[in-house]
Image: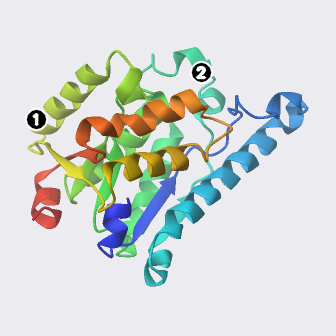
């Protein structure tokens, strides 16, 4: 993300499933169950806002407004689909899930405002149902825009199906005449500095991510010399790759 911002692109983060009761490392367990949803959702919103502030800290003053967040305020899978936490990676996308259309409407609105030059979508490695749902909603835009898929963490590092899921995605996009190519995005900072910064940003989400998971997520980039790997379509390669 910093890579694009420094290149003077405007980045809009579409924050999708923000209504949640999931905050295992917080004090939410001591809140009355009738208040838990609003309490946790507000806590997670504050974490998102902190993430934005931290991302902007290193940007030149003239670029700080190029990063923004759009919150769709949708319910996450345990609430929306009544899925137990231990089954979030064990179910397919429901084509009739109303959230798919809501996400598409938000993306269409960005396109109509000429605010969507390109789109970055979860690869849904590990088959986490909310990530799969977002990917499904965004797929109609993949054929018409420069598009890239990011490797979902921590699933890309820890889930046993991650490699097979990536192969399946690449096969599916090839069948759609949108073959994907891997690209690496990095900043000018040192490898150690980049990993440290990633870890700091990840641990902003203290209600959801503990130090062990934060280390797994940050250190995943060491396999790419601190870069982030995306899987991009031909339009992305033509538009953004030197």
The vertical placement of 82 against 220, above or below, is: above
Q: Is residue 151 visible?
A: no
The vertical placement of 167 against 18, above or below, is: above
The answer to which of 241 and 80 lies nearer the viewer is 241
The vertical placement of 60 against 230, above or below, is: below
Q: How many marks?
A: 2
The answer to which of 29 and 89 lies nearer the viewer is 29
Q: Is residue 194 visible?
A: yes
The vertical placement of 235 against 117, above or below, is: above
Q: Which residue is mark 2?
A: 83
Q: Crowdedness of circle 2 by 10 Å Cα count: few (<14), some, many (20+)?
A: some
Residue at point 13%, 61% (across, down): 241
Name the spot of residue 211 as percent of width and height, x first: 58, 32
Q: Which residue is mark 1?
A: 175
Residue at point 54%, 48% (across, down): 200
The answer to which of 84 and 26 lies nearer the viewer is 26
SS class, disc 2 = loop
Name the spot of residue 103 as percent of width and height, x first: 47, 51
Tell me how far mark 2 sits from mark 1, CA to CA. Answer: 31 Å
Residue at point 21%, 59% (across, down): 146
């Amino acid at each position: 993300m910093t890579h694009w911002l420094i290149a003077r692109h405007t980045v809009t983060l579409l924050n999708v499933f923000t209504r949640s009761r999931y905050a295992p490392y917080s004090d939410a367990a001591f809140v009355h169950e009738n208040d838990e949803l609003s309490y946790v959702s507000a806590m997670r919103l504050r974490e998102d806002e902190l993430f934005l502030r931290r991302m902007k800290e290193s940007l030149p003053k003239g670029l700080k407004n190029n990063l923004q967040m759009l919150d769709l305020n949708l319910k996450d899978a345990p609430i929306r689909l009544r899925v137990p936490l231990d089954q979030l990676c064990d179910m397919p996308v429901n084509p009739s899930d109303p959230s798919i259309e809501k996400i598409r409407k938000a993306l269409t609105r960005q396109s109509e405002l000429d605010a969507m030059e390109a789109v970055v979508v979860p690869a849904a490695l590990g088959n986490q149902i909310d990530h799969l749902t977002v990917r499904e909603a965004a797929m109609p835009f993949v054929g018409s825009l420069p598009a890239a898929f990011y490797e979902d963490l921590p699933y890309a590092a820890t889930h046993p199906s991650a490699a097979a899921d990536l192969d399946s995605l690449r096969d599916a996009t090839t069948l759609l005449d949108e073959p994907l190519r891997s690209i690496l995005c990095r900043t000018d900072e040192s490898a150690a500095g980049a990993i440290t910064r990633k870890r700091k940003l990840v641990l902003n989400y203290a209600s959801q991510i503990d130090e062990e998971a934060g280390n797994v997520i940050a250190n995943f980039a060491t396999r790419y010399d601190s870069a982030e790997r995306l899987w991009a379509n031909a339009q992305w390669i033509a538009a953004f790759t030197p």
